[in-house]
Amino acid sequence: MSPLAFIHGLRPGDLPQPVLHQARRCLLDLVGVAASGRGTELSRIVHGFALRQMGASAGGARLLFDGRRASAAGAAFAGASTIDSFDAHDGHALTKGHAGVAILPALLAVADAEGLIADGRLDGGEVLTALVLGYEIATRAGIALHGSVSDYHTSGAWNALACAAVAARLLGLDHGRTRHALGIAEYHGPRSQMMRCIDHPTMLKDGSGWGAFAGVSAAYLAQDGFTGAPAITLEAPEQAGLWADLGSRWYILEQYFKPWPVCRWAQPAVEAAAMLLAEHEIAADEIVRVEVGSFAEAVRLGAAPPLTTEAAQYALGFPLAAFLVRRRLGGAEIGAEGLADPAIAAMRERIVLHEDADLSRQFPAKRLATLRITMRDGRILSSKPTAARGDPDDPLPDEAVMRKFLELSRDMDPALARSLADGTMGLGAETLSLDGLLAPLFIPLARLQQAA
């Protein structure tokens, strides 16, 4: 099936049950991450920016966990930036990045701006279908980009195409205008340098806010007749094989889910620590030295003391130290509380990182780490090469995804959070109106504490 036929012809009945179930899991996880992300300074800034600089002259789309209105492109930008601000969202190994972070905010923004939610033209089956097609377009575009250019670009460079595809479907563009929307999104997608953000972590993050903005803007430009085809990552002859299995191979099933809100490259080391803590009696103040072996990109995250939550999320030494000290790794640990904890700071100083050439050769298909902990009593505790939980070959079970959501949405009334989770996991059964299910996503979190 051609990409254009796939974008406009895919129907809920075409989706295998495992694909529908995975789409629900992705949706739930993204909503939870957005709820936690809404408390970050990054989210506060981008919401204000979207309102001032991307406002809507009339109508527009509601901002996630806020309710104020901006343009569809502005709401997509703020929503994707908010999810990106709390690094716990899903991703794919071969793209070395994230799709859903931009797709969901783009989908909700266009649907809300066009009145599709309020008037019932969008149902649960269509939400899941649009989400799935976004993952399929984004993941292939990301693999194509990494395979055709030498520099490592942020996720916004390729998830912009998925946002354009979803928006084109919701807007009912014809195939010609959709082709131009994809080309515009590819051309204007933020091909920013990911490793610069790894070396110098700031609020720039993974470029997904601008990817969502570029993709939604591309669809509206194409709707008005703006041209931009072709999208090379879709139409270059050497990419044909990558797109030939649309509708038969489902890349959404290959997404990973993160147990912790830090860069995926740091998580194998944390997982190795979790396994050792479960197997041995380890008191944090008895640890003398922690040696981490991992692939080069993970080691590049570094062990320097972070000064911001962004630097804490794009680090290896700090989140590992936090987990060893507190035996957990959540919003508190990567936020101001964790950054100021002297015990975590002291543990971080005992951590040494080195590249393991064999593990580097296996990256990005496998992301592994080894841990060697020296105790004050002379014991040396070592792990085998360990991957993070949540990969397709070791997926987080539904119960773990649900627990993660309830933890991430702790600022909501618990009964409302549970209702939203149950409704999301039952989406498509039409037992609850879509407008009713999505309503909490457009209400400020402070009001959701007593909403139920």
Image: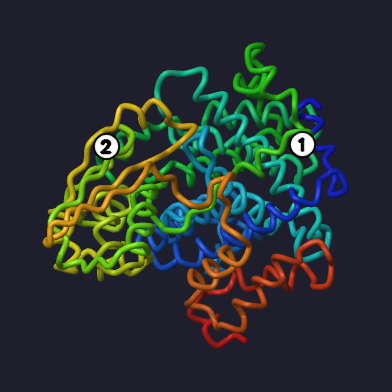
Instruction: Please determine whether, in this image, residue 235 is positioned above or below residue 436.
Output: above
Residue in front for this viewpoint, 178 or 261:
261
Return the mark for residue 300: 2
Q: Residue at x 62, y 59 (%)?
A: 61
Query: Are the residues at dot 1 and dot 2 in contact (C-beta closer than 8 Å)?
Result: no
Q: Residue at x 81, y 27 (%)?
A: 1
Taking the image as shown, residue 363 lies to the left or right of residue 234, namely left
Q: Give percent across and percent down for residue 86.
A: 42, 58
Taking the image as shown, residue 34 lies to the left or right of residue 437, namely left
Residue farthest top in this picture:
237
Q: Residue at x 50, y 61 (%)?
A: 33
Q: Give percent across and percent down for residue 269.
A: 34, 49
Q: What residue does disc 1 label?
A: 7
Return the mark for residue 181: none
Q: Secondary structure at mark 2?
A: helix
Instruction: Using a 10 Å C-alpha cutoff, classify the residue at mark 2 as few (fewer than 14 neighbours), some (14 to 19) or many (20 or more).
Output: some
Instruction: Using a 10 Å C-alpha cutoff, classify the residue at mark 1 as few (fewer than 14 neighbours), some (14 to 19) or many (20 or more).
Output: many
Q: Quadrant of residue 135?
A: top right
Instruction: Please determine whether, in this image, residue 171 is positioned above or below residue 179.
Output: below
